[in-house]
Image: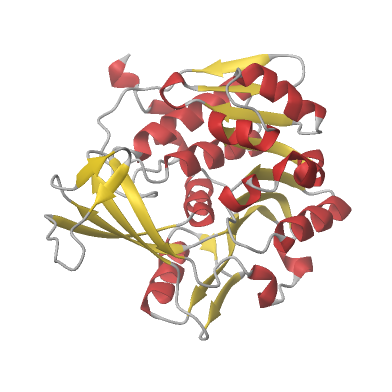
Amino acid sequence: MLDVVCIGAATEDLFFFSDSFEIADQKVFLPWGEKFAVGRLERRFGGGAFNAAVACSRLGLGTALFGRVGNDRPGAAIKEFLEGERVSTKFLAVDSGFKTSTSALLSSGGERAIVMFRGENDNLLDTSPDWDEVLDCRWLLVIDLAGTNNDLLFEVVERAGTRGIKLAYVPGQGELRLGKERLKPVFAAASVLVLNLYEAGMILGKRGGGAEGMLSEFRKLGVEMPVITKGPKGSVAYDGSQFYYQEATPKVRVVDRTGAGDAFSSTFTAGVVLGRAVPEALLLAAKNSSSVVTRVGGTDGLLALSALERFGEDEE
């Protein structure tokens, strides 16, 4: 039996680095009809579930990825990479009818804008999964499905409930727009929910407000352990009786923020799966998120458990 099956996207990520991007009002401006030369190009693999699967595997969990790629060069490379990370690819659908999802990231000063081709990446129900095999696990981590078809999310929740499998949920933009009422069955089934302050407000229909109040609302909706991240202000979790606070630590030089949220959510979930106490799981999550942003892409900075526990000791 696997410890965790991560469900969601696997993509090829192309990073275009330049100090000359014209950025104003949180927008990137490029001359239309002209060429724009950048100083550096990096190629990585990513996607929320891909990043999460690598994180969980490096932390010692038996992990599989349930995702979809094309029968093309990026798809083959993604499969090979996962197998090299000891992530099972038995649920990775490889289809010749479409291309692997690809992102172009325009990066400057650690921040980036993303142009994305998703293709059929989120239509995992079309792959006719063998649910008996997919559900032969202790935990499901559903992360950033983001597609237009939300049937998969509710299918997973219903099937996990019938098997008593624990669910960790990290909503994507598509699910956020569903709102609180539509997502009630998901919250009622979730052992872990991780989202940032803006996303929490979007789901609950609030503008502003403290994390503690929103965490209490998610508990009332049935979430066993909701967690809200607050960027440089750290994170807070709530188990119904106590709030747990974690600073964003340690301080590092940011190279690229891609995958920081994936690192946090998957590492916190892994900590819970490993039986760590909530404060320790939050600390491990904060450390892995800090490590990821020191490297390009969502996986280069992910650490094994022993290295993660030592990370930041030189700064203390």
User: Which residue is at the far front?
Assistant: 32
Vertical placement of 155 versus 273: above or below? below
Q: Between residues 99 and 263, which one lies in front from this camera angle?
A: 99
Q: Where is residue 104 in the image (x, y as percent from the top left)?
A: 32, 60
Q: Residue furthest right?
A: 162
**The C terminus is located in which quarter?**
top left
Image: 183 above or below 245: below
Res 78 quadrant in image: bottom left
Determine the residue positioned at 74% across, 67% down.
133
Query: What residue is shown at x 46% (from left), y 18% (from top)?
Result: 247
Residue placed farthest to the bottom in the image? 96
Q: Quadrant of residue 65?
A: bottom right
Q: In this orientation, which residue lies closer to the viewer: 291 or 273?
A: 291
Left or right: residue 292 compared with residue 177: left
As drawn, is 163 to the left or to the right of 247?
right
The answer to whether residue 186 of the structure is visible from this angle is no
Q: Above or below — where is 176 with respect to 214?
A: below
Q: Which quadrant would residue 14 be assigned to in this image?
A: bottom left
Residue in view at x 62 percent, y 62 percent: 148
